[in-house]
């Protein structure tokens, strides 16, 4: 099992896409320079810092993983979340609110940024193969398919110790979802929003957790979505031929097999202006 690399990333108010030639596109709010990726090259995966929608949130950052194992970052750096220039031998990256995680080829994890809730207490993790960042917690999958979590657990979002046979994991604001090898999904955390209502999902090949919603892709290219839909971020039922998804605070992105991108949800900052994108491609 290998660390999953993403061609799409959705943040609080911006979206990022990785093209097949290693260049990167970004749209949305760029007040903190989170969309200044036009000079990036040789990128194999992208991540966008995300945080729940609230009046005191909004600044974000963007991370790119290059094929040589080095890491790029731009945007808000108030807690040192962009201080990743010295990282080497990285095979996957994740970005959350005020922090960045990097998975090393040896299965260890690097962290930069805010650790007030213990979300960066990941340096003891070993044999990790996949990573994700939520608002105040971090999650990972180990080589044996079990799960790890660190950080705020006030709604049980870190209660993943019993999960087994995982191939992927994703952390939202107050919930965490995991994808099992049999195509079924598991979830833990705050349930009032409905974001954990994934028990009946089947044949899922990829998933992502937004702040208060969860989206998944089936082997047939259909997209599933549960949870908060106040901005229309779960209105994905008509999408088809999808190979990957990204869930932001209140918007959702879908990557079609032909390299184009569709979107749903909040577009107040232009984060859904992706209709002109092409050649977005998984590594």
Image (cartoon, rainbow, N blue to C red):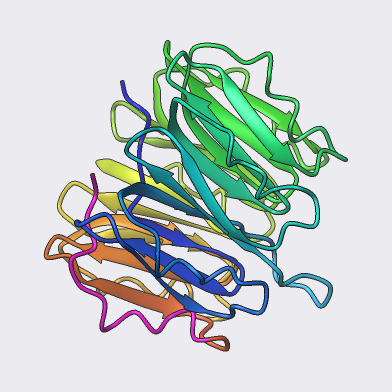
Residue toward you, 265 or 163? 265
The quadrant where residue 69 appears: top left
> To which quarter of the image does residue 133 belong?
top right
Q: In this rendering, does residue 73 appear at all?
A: yes
Rendered position, 17 above or below 6: below
Q: Position of residue 151 (x, y in %)?
A: 77, 34
- Regarding residue 201, the answer to whether it shows in the image is no
Main secondary structure along the magenta-highlighted residues: loop
**Could you say which is closer to the camera, residue 232 or residue 210?**
210
Whether the magenta-drawn stretch holds residue 16 is answered as: no
Q: Quadrant of the N terminus?
A: top left
Residue most toward the left?
258
- In this view of the protein, which residue sits in the foreground, 142 or 183? 142
Q: Which residues are magenta?
A: 270-283
Relative to residue 222, is residue 106 drawn left or right? right
Q: Position of residue 241 (x, y in %)?
A: 15, 63
Q: Count of labels shown?
A: 0
**x%, y% of residue 243?**
22, 54
Q: Residue at x 43, y 80 (%)?
A: 272
Is 109 situated left or right of 245 in this image?
Answer: right
Left or right of 223 in this view: 253: right
Residue pictured at 60% horizontal, 32% vertical: 139
Which quadrant would the C terminus be assigned to in this image?
Answer: top left
């Amino acid at each position: 099992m290998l660390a999953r690399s993403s061609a799409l990333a959705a943040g609080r108010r911006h979206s990022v896409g990785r093209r097949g030639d290693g260049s990167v596109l970004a749209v949305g709010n760029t007040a903190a320079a989170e969309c200044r990726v036009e000079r990036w090259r040789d990128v194999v995966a992208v991540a966008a810092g995300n945080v729940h929608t609230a009046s005191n949130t909004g600044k974000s950052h963007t991370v790119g993983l290059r094929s040589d194992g080095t890491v790029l970052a731009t945007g808000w750096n108030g807690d040192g979340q962009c201080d990743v220039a010295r990282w080497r031998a990285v095979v996957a990256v994740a970005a959350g609110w005020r922090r960045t995680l990097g998975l090393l080829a040896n299965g260890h994890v690097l962290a930069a940024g805010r650790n007030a809730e213990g979300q960066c207490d990941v340096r003891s993790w070993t044999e990790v193969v996949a990573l994700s960042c939520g608002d105040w917690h971090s999650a990972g999958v180990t080589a044996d398919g079990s799960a790890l979590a660190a950080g705020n657990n006030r709604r049980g979002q870190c209660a993943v110790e019993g999960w087994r046979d995982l191939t992927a994991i994703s952390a939202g604001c107050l919930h965490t979802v995991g994808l099992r090898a049999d195509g079924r999904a598991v979830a833990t955390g705050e349930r009032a929003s409905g974001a954990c209502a994934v028990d009946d999902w089947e044949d899922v090949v990829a998933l992502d957790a937004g702040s208060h919603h969860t989206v998944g892709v089936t082997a047939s290219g259909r997209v599933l979505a549960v949870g908060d839909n106040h901005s229309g971020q779960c209105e994905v039922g008509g999408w088809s031929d999808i190979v990957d998804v990204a869930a932001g605070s209140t918007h959702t992105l879908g990557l079609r097999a032909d390299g184009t991108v569709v979107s749903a949800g909040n577009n107040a900052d232009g984060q859904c202006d992706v209709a002109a994108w092409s050649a977005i491609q998984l590594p």
